Image (cartoon, rainbow, N blue to C red):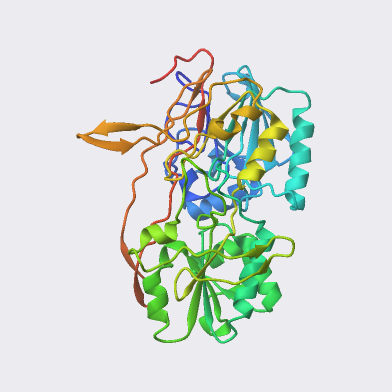
Amino acid sequence: MESGLISVDRWAKGSSAYFLTHLHSDHTHGLSSSWSNGPLFCSRLTAKLIPFKFPNFNLSLIRVLEIGSWHALSPSSGFPTTLHVFVVDACHCPGSIMLVFRGEFGCRICTGDFRWEPSCEKARMAKEMLVAALKDDVVDVVYIDNTYSNPIYDFPTRQIAANQIIDIILSHPDYDIIIGINTLGKEDLLLQISRALKIKIWVWPERLQTMHLLGFNDTFTTNTTLTRVRAVPQYSFSVDTLEALNTMRPTIGIMPSALPWVKKSLQKGNLSGSFLTSSFKRGRLSSNSVQIDEQNGAIGPLNKFHEHIYSVPYSDHSNFAEIEDFIRLIHPATLKGIVSSSSCYIEPMYYFGRLCRVNQPIQLLHKPKREENGKSVGVVSTKFSFGGDYVEPERNKGKNFKGKFLGVRVSKLSILRRKNRGAKILDNNSPEQD
């Protein structure tokens, strides 16, 4: 260990131990089947899924972290210094965890991606577990999931959004239903739909294997003749796909995403739009909203984003109010955002610095622009050093490709990615890096 101590969701060489919060691809960029840089610490469920995502992975490198427990890494186990790690359920996707680190560098929390809704029992238990583990500790840094760290993001709970999706399906009894989902996540949503409609849901073969690994053996199928509801990869969900399918059978698409659901506006720095509208030609989609009764989740007059597409504000990330509640609960000295390569990037100290222990100057809402080849470009990288911290995300490289799904040629949906994000905590004896 010449340069680093630990890395979280960051896979460059130079650390003594590596921690994986969950298996979404934007947190595993740089991790592969040939991984050999060091031991990988993760939850038991993530450890179970790793061989499926990375065939031939060296399983001897995996170290399982139990939720609700402190784990000690010490020189006796080959670690350069004593470090304690506490693990909490992040309630984001299967196996997702939040990490608390104690060591010579103080006390730090890496949330990973998380959603702690006030109405979620699992989140309530996780919150109580975290508070009990911290006791009277002062948290020096929180590496926060700042995906929606802007007050314009005010979407409802996942239960309300799930009810809305079920209502849409019930109101279209003669239609096939296409739902765009991640390669991991939205399991609870699909289970609710299956139970409410008393049907199985079609998923693609690789996703069915994942469902079986998670213990869901009777809810999903790869036989399209058994169900009218299909869950497809988000990259296969597009206007072109829905238009093509409607030439054969009446079909509607549902995209569970919080991004289009901007209910509030700011006088300055307003963020608007969605990955749906940004991916298609202007004029093909509208940005009409839905009236939501947040008391019971009922849908008011519903306008489509497209003739065949609904978008429902279902998110596995905390909204602004939930992030604010979390920071108020922890009351850290400072914050560092883990999302740094996104068009919706917000410096978390801009809105939440007032909730921190240390009074700091107001940060910029967005990163300033710089000149490159004579052109002004936005800077979204958050490479920084703070008390031995080091975070250096990689540039987000968008890619377009053509593919086939259900016999229909489609274009890949340009989904906002947040690649190679994470934190690297340096040993106190290590030099700061540029």
Q: Residue at x 63, y 20 (%)?
A: 358
Residue lying furthest left = 374
**Could you tell me if residue 405 is visible in this image?**
no
Q: Is residue 3 above or below residue 380?
A: above
Percent from the top left, x then y, of residue 81? 60, 18
Q: x, y (%) of residue 348?
A: 54, 34
* Residue 18 shown left or right of residue 342 in the figure: right
Q: Is residue 152 above or below residue 330?
A: below
In percent of the image, x 63 and y 79: which residue is there? 170
On screen, 185 above or below 243? above
| Residue 272 percent across, percent down from the top left | 46, 52
Where 280 sits versus 366, above or below? below
Residue 151: quarter of image = top right
Q: Is residue 321 left or right of residue 265?
A: right
Q: Is residue 239 visible?
A: yes
Q: Position of residue 207 (x, y in %)?
A: 53, 64
